Image (tube, rainbow, N blue to C red):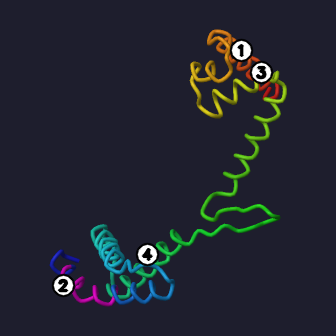
Amino acid sequence: MTRTEFEHISVLIRGRIVALARRFARAADLPDPAEDIAQETLEALWRLCEKGYPVRDPEALAVKIAKNICVMHYRRRRIVPDSIGGMDFEGGFPATERTDRDDIEAVRERLYGTLSKTQRQYMEMRNGKGMSLDEISAATGRPKSSIKVTISAARRQLFEKLEKEVL
């Protein structure tokens, strides 16, 4: 399909695509993205034509592309948490992401449990809250050098325990 043929066809089918997108937006209770969907549809149709895809019925193909784009817009806006066993899982994220995060937190808690109370406190302030050594020193009343040594020892201890667990 040549560029002039595409321009002629796009003028003819644009109205149908916009109408389809508006009906979809009303039915799905979404803001009206009709012009955006029409533009995306025509762009996708043009890319197919450029790649040499055999287009027998450009209008039918454009409608199919527009419907797919409408569904894509719907899915992006309709991520709803599902409750399973009292825990909320947001849709649209891989299931492993939540379990990985929970596993990392469980390992962290188990390893932090081996530290002394002071080491845990300093590590939480430094890594959990992102406080600087000066801020930790001001909050605890301890010298900065003492805090630095304690955190360093705690990190070394955590690394050794983690290394033993992995190997």
What amino acid does circle 2 point to?
Answer: His
Seen in the picture, residue 5 relative to 160 is either above or below; the reply is below
Of residues 26 and 44, the one drawn nearer to the viewer in this rendering: 26
Q: CA distance from mark 2 to mark 4?
A: 22 Å
Q: Nearer the viewer, residue 52 or 43?
A: 43
Question: The residue under label 3 is which amino acid type?
Answer: Thr
Q: Earlier in the sequence, mark 3 or mark 2?
A: 2
Main SS of the magenta part reads helix
Dot 1, crowdedness within 10 Å: few (<14), some or many (≥20)? some
- Reply yes or no: does residue 29 show up in magenta: no
Q: Which label's residue is closer to the chain start, 2 or 1?
A: 2
* Residue visible at 74% across and 26% down in the picture: 121
Instruction: Classify the position of the C terminus by image quarter.
Output: top right
For the point 67% across and 17% down, which residue is it?
141
Q: Residues within 10 Å of mark 2 (few under 14, many from 20)?
A: few
Q: Is residue 13 magenta?
A: yes
Determine which residue is flagged by label 4. 69
Residue 97 point in image, percent of width and height: 66, 51
Q: Give how far apart the Cα atoms at labels 4 and 1 are.
A: 56 Å
At horizontal 50% and vertical 88% (from top left) the residue drawn is 27
Q: Nearer the viewer, mark 3 or mark 2?
A: 3
Residue 8 is marked as 2
Q: Are marks 2 and 1 in contact (CB under 8 Å)?
A: no
Callout in the foreground (4, 1): 1
Task: Count every numbered label the image shows and give the total.
Answer: 4
**x and y, in percent, of residue 99 in the image:** 73, 50
User: N-terminal of the two: label 1 or label 3?
Assistant: 3
Q: Which residue is mark 1?
A: 150
Q: Are marks 3 and 2 in contact (CB under 8 Å)?
A: no
In the rendered view, would you say 44 is above or below 67?
above
* Front position among marks 1 and 3: 3
